[in-house]
Image (cartoon, rainbow, N blue to C red):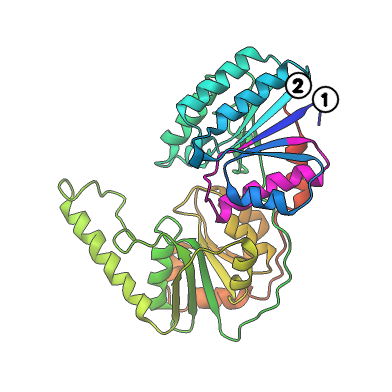
């Protein structure tokens, strides 16, 4: 880290965000304290505020913006930086977590701050996986990057996608790994159980996994997550609307309800649940022989996959043009399975049986995470 660099972090998560969003904010918060780097942290998240009040922090100062009282997070940052500019000439690194949550009004505030403070540099965490993978998410991701790029040359980016630094479409971008602590596995099941966690959606591969129930009579399934929608478990790629493509619409609905017959099987445990933290999710994962993740539908990185490997749980995955394909291809190639093999008799069962005893370790530890955050990208 360059000497004299002072850090300000803006956590744009909502006041009641939880799960992966909250854990990432905590990871960043504790990284500064762990590496003894002074930072001021702005947030509207009550859980982070509670954490700050219950633990002793020597290097991080937290400023809480209560949105219920009409306090704007970026206006509070504006006041702080403006006041500090009159008393210090040190270079300031402003790190914004989750650029997609920043409004146009807030970007205007940032633009004025850059104009009035020549020593201010901004780094923004953005999504680029949709762009790199050429998916439907690409346009909205590009719009976020373009909006921040308009602020000038003193803006750069972070991304969770390991492919990001080699992607020429975005300049000044670095890869930020998702760290996980190793959690020794304590639970082993006598049955072969494949787990599915996180968002219960077509994009994450739930439709394919439920369909595989009919082809793997010796395999048990444990499904725990959030966001389940019975009407959108499957949708044809060519479906536009019921008016323009009625046949594809009816076909999608029929397949939706047909595959949900798998939920009636005694071999399938299904629960809509949002885990309070990653430790709780890790304990539940350890009831499984392996965890399933589809790289063919979603272009994004997955914290739950990293957590699974850190918890000693193998990952069974099918390949695709996504951030996780690149990671799993290096970290756990043993769990790779073609999508078509999910629907071959007992093929998934046999793979789960093969990989359940393979040792797994965290892909990225906190030393790597701390090192990336400590690199102040000024100049």
The disc label shown at residue 38, or none: none
- Relative side of 23 to 246, left or right: right
- Residue 29 among magenta residues: yes
Q: Position of residue 49 (x, y in %)?
A: 64, 47
The residue stretch that appears in magenta: 10-39
- Relative side of 202 to 87, left or right: left
Q: Is the residue marked by circle 1 packed among few (<14), some (14-19), or many (20+) residues within 10 Å? A: few
Q: For mark 1, what is the residue? A: 4
The disc label shown at residue 91, or none: 2
Looking at the rendered structure, the secondary structure element under dot 2 is: loop
Q: Is the residue marked by circle 2 packed among few (<14), some (14-19), or many (20+) residues within 10 Å? A: many
Q: Is residue 11 above or below residue 283?
A: above
Q: Is residue 63 above or below residue 172?
A: below
Q: Residue at x 29, y 54 (%)?
A: 236
Q: Report the Cα–Cα distance between label 1 and label 2.
A: 6 Å
- Relative side of 137 to 330, left or right: left
Residue 302 visible in the shown view: no
Q: Residue at x 53, y 39 (%)?
A: 127
Looking at the rendered structure, the secondary structure element under dot 1 is: loop
Q: Position of residue 341 (x, y in %)?
A: 46, 68
Q: Residue at x 47, y 71 (%)?
A: 223
Residue 282 visible in the shown view: yes
- Residue 153 among magenta residues: no
Work out whether residue 273 or residue 65 is closer to the camera in this orientation and state it: 65
Q: Residue at x 16, y 53 (%)?
A: 246
- Relative side of 355 to 37, left or right: left
């Amino acid at each position: 880290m360059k000497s004299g660099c002072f850090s300000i972090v803006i956590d744009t998560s909502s006041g009641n965000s939880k799960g992966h969003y909250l854990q990432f904010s905590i990871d960043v918060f504790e990284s500064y304290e762990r590496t003894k780097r002074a930072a001021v942290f702005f947030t509207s998240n009550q859980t982070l505020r509670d954490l700050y009040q219950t633990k002793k922090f020597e290097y991080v100062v937290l400023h809480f913006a209560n949105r219920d009282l009409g306090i704007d997070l970026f206006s509070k940052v504006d006041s702080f930086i403006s006041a500090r500019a009159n008393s210090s000439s040190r270079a300031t690194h402003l790190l914004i977590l989750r650029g997609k949550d920043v409004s146009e009004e807030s970007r205007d505030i940032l633009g004025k701050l850059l104009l009035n403070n020549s020593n201010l540099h901004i780094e923004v965490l953005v999504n680029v996986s949709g762009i790199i993978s050429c998916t439907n998410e690409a346009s909205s991701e590009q719009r976020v990057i373009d909006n921040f790029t308009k602020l000038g040359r003193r803006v750069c980016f972070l991304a969770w996608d390991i492919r990001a630094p080699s992607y020429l479409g975005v300049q000044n971008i670095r890869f930020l790994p998702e760290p996980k602590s190793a959690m020794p596995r304590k639970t082993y099941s006598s049955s072969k159980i494949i787990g599915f966690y996180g968002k219960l959606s077509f994009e994450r591969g739930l439709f394919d996994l439920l369909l595989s129930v009919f082809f793997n009579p010796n395999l048990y399934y444990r499904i725990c997550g959030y966001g389940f929608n019975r009407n959108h478990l499957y949708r044809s790629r060519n479906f536009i609307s019921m008016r323009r493509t009625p046949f594809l619409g009816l076909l999608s609905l029929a397949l939706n309800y047909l595959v949900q017959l798998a939920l009636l099987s005694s071999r399938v445990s299904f629960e809509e649940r949002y885990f309070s933290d990653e430790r709780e999710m890790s304990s539940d994962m350890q009831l499984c022989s392996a965890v399933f993740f589809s790289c063919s539908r979603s272009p994004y990185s997955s914290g739950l996959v990293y957590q699974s490997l850190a918890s000693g749980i193998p990952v069974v995955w099918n390949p695709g043009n996504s951030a996780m394909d690149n990671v799993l291809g290096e970290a756990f190639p043993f769990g790779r399975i073609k999508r078509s093999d999910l629907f071959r008799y007992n093929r998934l069962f046999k793979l789960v049986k093969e990989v359940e005893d393979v040792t797994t370790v965290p892909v990225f530890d906190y030393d790597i995470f701390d090192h990336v955050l400590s690199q102040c990208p000024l100049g």
